[in-house]
Every structure is written in C-alpha cells, then in structure tokens.
Amino acid sequence: MMTRTIATIALVAATALAGCDQADHTIVVGPPGDNDVVATNADVQLPPAIAASKTYRCADNKIVTIDWLADNKTANVRTEKNGTPTQVAAAEAGQPMTAEGGYSVSGTSTASSVTIAVAGGKAQSCKA
C-alpha cells in the first residue's frame, strides 16, 4: 500500500513537471506603444481635496451638509444625510458658488454662518 502511494505521488509530480514550459516568457501590459498614452495624459489634474465638512441648520430648520474643497472655488452640497451631492462652483475664490437647479452658497468654510439656496428655494442664513 505504501509503495503504491509513493508511486502515485511520483507519477503526479512527474506529470506536473512535464507540463512546465522552459521557454522565456515576456509579459507585456497594454497594447504596443502604451508609453505614448502615458505621455499624452501627463497634465491630468486631480480634483481638489475636501478641506472641511460642516453641517448647517438653516432658518427654515433644514439641515444642509457642505464639503468645502481645497481650491476655495468649489463645494459639494447635500440636503440629505446620505444624498447625492450637488457641486457648486465660483469663477474665483471668495465669490458666491452656484450650480444649475437654483443652488448657491455664499461664505467660507471658516465662517460660523453662510447663505445657502437649495433647489430653487430662496437664499437663507444657515449656522454651523
């Protein structure tokens, strides 16, 4: 019985080794000329990081969350805790940020209150 087990193991090992190809293998990632694509995409810029996240209570008692981005020209506004954010933007830092659909934010991430209008509503004061 022991001899059969050893013989079976040796036969399996020999079969596995016989299947190995001894030739060199070159692994190429991507299509030929892929280095050209890397050079073309060299000036891709990452989006700004979140500088601060604050939750505000507005005059009408609504809760609004704003993720202020590090470029000081954009922010993400959420009217629901896990809702989809709406990005508001300004041409220059310090200017009011707006987005389609009637969204606007005036203020900075360091201020204790900002003026916010969401989804076409009127602008109102909101406190952090």
Image (cartoon, grey):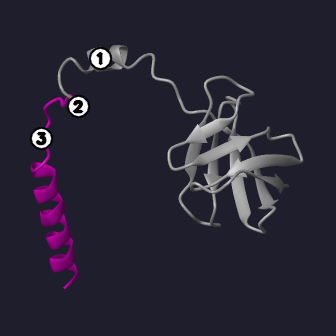
Position of the C terminus, as image quadrant, is bottom right
- Residue 7 lies in the magenta-colored region: yes
Rendered location of residue 13, percent (x, y): 18, 60
Q: Is residue 17 depicted above or below 46 in this figure?
A: below
The mark that comes first in sequence, 1 or 3, is 3
The circle drawn on residue 98 is none
Which of the 4 image quarters holds residue 41? top left
Q: Which mark is residue 35?
A: 1
Q: Is residue 43 left or right of residue 51?
A: left
Q: Amino acid at mark 2?
A: Ile
Q: What residue is pinned by disc 2?
A: 27
What is the span of residues highlighted in magenta in the rendered image?
A: 1-28
Marks 1 and 3 sit apart, C-alpha to C-alpha, by 30 Å
Residue 83 is covered by the magenta coloring: no
* Residue type for callout 3: Asp
Give amino acid for label 1.
Asn
At 15% from the left and 56% from the top, the residue drawn is 16
Mark before the other along the chain sequence, 2 or 1: 2
The residue that appears at 86% across and 40% down in the rendered structure is 110
SS class, disc 2: loop
User: Which residue is denoted by mark 3 in the rendering?
Assistant: 21
Determine the secondary structure under disc 1: helix
Mark 2 neighbour density, 10 Å: few (under 14) some (14–19) many (20 or more): few
For the N terminus, the quadrant is bottom left
